[in-house]
């Protein structure tokens, strides 16, 4: 399953509409606002997709979330707060970042998380 982000205005791109899971106010790490507008809705959407698959009989320990750029931030948000949704086996994050606050505590059943990105990416 490979969902596509909705098209919406993105502040850092001068408000131009583009596929985006959430708004980004700045590409500067010290200015980027955690929990930007739209990320909670995107995280909930991904959690609902996970729940649909669990309801269809796929065991959570057989589900891995993966995402590139904003999709990686959404996958992290969906997977790391186990109190808010079903646990998954792991998260694959490609050229991405943490977009939302981490839960105050994580259980020992937190999924494996793997980050990958190149050395030449000027943004990440």
Image (cartoon, rainbow, N blue to C red):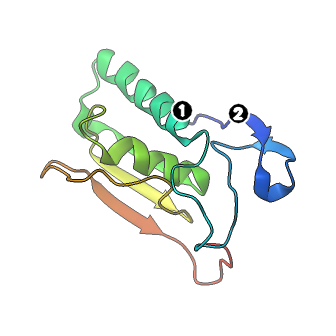
Which residue is the extreme one toward the left?
A: 108
Q: Could you tell me if residue 1 is visible in this image?
A: no
Q: Position of residue 94 (x, y in %)?
A: 52, 62
Left/right of residue 57 with respect to residue 69 in the rendered view: left
Secondary structure under the numbered disc 2 in the rendered image: loop
Looking at the image, residue 13 lies above or below residue 5: below
Circle 1 sits on which residue? Answer: 41
Q: Position of residue 24 (x, y in %)?
A: 68, 54
Looking at the image, residue 89 lies above or below residue 31: above
* Quarter assignment of residue 3: top right
Looking at the image, residue 111 lies above or below residue 116: above
How dense is the environment of label 1, judged by Cα within 10 Å: few (below 14), some, or many (20 and up)? few
Looking at the image, residue 113 lies above or below residue 43: below
Contact between marks 1 and 2 (CB within 8 A): the answer is no
Which residue is the extreme one toward the bottom?
A: 119
Between the C-alphas of marks 1 and 2, the distance is: 11 Å
Is 37 in front, or is 51? 37
The numbered dot on residue 6 is 2
The numbered dot on residue 105 is none
Secondary structure under the numbered disc 1 in the rendered image: helix
* Quarter assignment of residue 84: top left
Is 31 in front, or is 102? 31
Left/right of residue 102 with respect to residue 71 in the rendered view: left
Residue drawn at 29 percent across, 40 percent down: 88
């Amino acid at each position: 399953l490979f969902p596509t982000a909705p098209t919406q205005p993105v502040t850092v791109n001068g408000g131009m509409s583009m596929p985006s899971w959430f708004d980004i106010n700045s590409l500067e790490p010290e200015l980027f606002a955690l929990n930007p507008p739209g990320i909670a809705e995107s995280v909930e959407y991904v959690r609902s997709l996970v729940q649909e698959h669990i309801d269809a009989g796929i065991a959570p320990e057989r589900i891995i979330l993966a995402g590139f750029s904003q999709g990686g931030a959404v996958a992290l948000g969906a997977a790391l707060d186990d109190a808010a949704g079903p646990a998954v086996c792991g998260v694959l994050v490609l050229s991405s970042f943490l977009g939302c606050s981490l839960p105050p505590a994580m259980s020992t059943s937190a999924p494996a998380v793997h980050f990958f990105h190149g050395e030449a990416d000027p943004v990440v």
